[in-house]
């Protein structure tokens, strides 16, 4: 099955602590992993931190081309790892909550300035639009997206869902994870190959994640 349940040190909100693209998966230094779970992602699993914080999924966003980080922090990666990092200026630091991106496009929080939005577009190499999901400006926290599909907060409006489809160029669906949690970005990490979600995710939720992200 391309969707596996797991926790990070008994915490089911693995999306807050990790970031996954079609090239790599970043996880904190001191998280215990079972390789039989992470292999579904089909990419190298790299230990990393952001200015000694384990909250990689909250502080980082990105796609296969580039990672995004506030210039108030430093991304700490293995020295031999060739990864482009775009450091963005401004007061907003939780970029993982404010950016929803794949290799085709990005939806970003309306709170981000025009200059930062242009930097995001240049760094990720995709079209970027401001928007909300279910009225939330924290678009990265309330959705999970890959290059094959997107799963959004259940209260997303029709116009918001249409914008995600148009900019990210994938079909969208709605759902929850971790037993009814609507903040999917905090619960799930995924790429085109597979997905990991917190251990409290129910069977029906697993099925929705699998079908919405086209992992069947």
Image: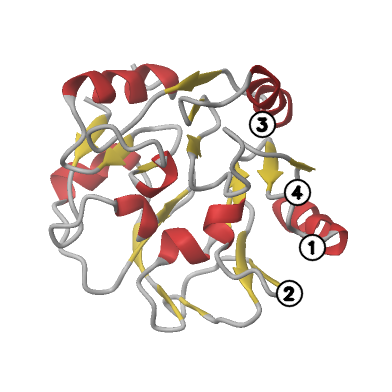
Q: Nearer the viewer, residue 44 or 94?
A: 94
Q: Which residue is mark 2?
A: 90
Tell me where residue 55 sits by quadrant: bottom left
Q: Are marks 4 and 1 in contact (CB under 8 Å)?
A: no
SS under mark 4? loop
Residue drawn at 43 percent across, 24 percent down: 213
How packed mark 1 is, by other alpha carbons closer than 10 Å (few <14, some 14-19, many 20 or more), is some
Judged by depth in the image, the label closer to the viewer, 2 or 3, is 2
Disc 2/disc 1 C-alpha distance (Å): 8 Å
> Which comes before the other along the chain, label 3 or label 1?
1
Q: Which residue is mark 3?
A: 168
Q: Which residue is mark 4?
A: 125
Judged by depth in the image, the label closer to the viewer, 2 or 4, is 2
How packed mark 3 is, by other alpha carbons closer than 10 Å (few <14, some 14-19, many 20 or more), is many
Q: Which mark is residue 116?
A: 1
Judged by depth in the image, the label closer to the viewer, 4 or 3, is 3
Q: Are marks 4 and 3 in contact (CB under 8 Å)?
A: no
Q: Are marks 2 and 3 in contact (CB under 8 Å)?
A: no
SS under mark 2? loop
> Which comes before the other along the chain, label 2 or label 1?
2
SS under mark 3? helix
> Which comes before the other along the chain, label 4 or label 1?
1
| Residue 50: % across, % down | 46, 76
Image position of 166 (left or right of 194): right
- Residue 14 visible? The answer is yes
SS under mark 1? helix
Q: Nearer the viewer, residue 118 or 85?
A: 118
Disc 4/disc 3 C-alpha distance (Å): 12 Å
Q: Are marks 2 and 1 in contact (CB under 8 Å)?
A: yes
Residue drawn at 33 percent across, 19 percent down: 208
């Amino acid at each position: 099955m391309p969707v596996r349940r797991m926790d990070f040190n008994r915490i089911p909100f693995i999306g807050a602590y990790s970031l996954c693209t079609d090239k790599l998966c970043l996880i904190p230094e001191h998280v215990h992993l079972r390789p039989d779970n992470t292999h579904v992602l089909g990419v190298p699993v790299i230990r990393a931190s952001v200015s000694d914080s384990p909250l990689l999924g909250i502080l980082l966003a990105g796609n296969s081309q580039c990672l995004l980080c506030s210039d108030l922090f430093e991304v700490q990666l293995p020295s031999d790892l060739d990864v482009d990092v775009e450091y963005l200026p401004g007061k907003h630091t939780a970029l993982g909550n404010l950016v929803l991106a794949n290799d085709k496009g990005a939806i970003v929080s309306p709170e981000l300035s025009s200059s930062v939005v242009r930097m995001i577009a240049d760094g990720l190499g995709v079209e970027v639009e401001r928007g909300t999901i279910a009225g939330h400006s924290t678009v990265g926290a309330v959705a999970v997206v890959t290059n094959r599909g997107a799963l959004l907060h259940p209260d997303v409006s029709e116009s918001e869902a249409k914008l995600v489809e148009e900019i990210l160029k994938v079909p969208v669906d709605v759902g929850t994870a971790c037993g009814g949690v609507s903040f999917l970005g905090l619960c799930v990490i995924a790429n085109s190959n597979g997905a990991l979600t917190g251990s409290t995710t129910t069977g029906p939720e697993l099925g929705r994640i699998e079908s919405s992200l086209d992992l069947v």
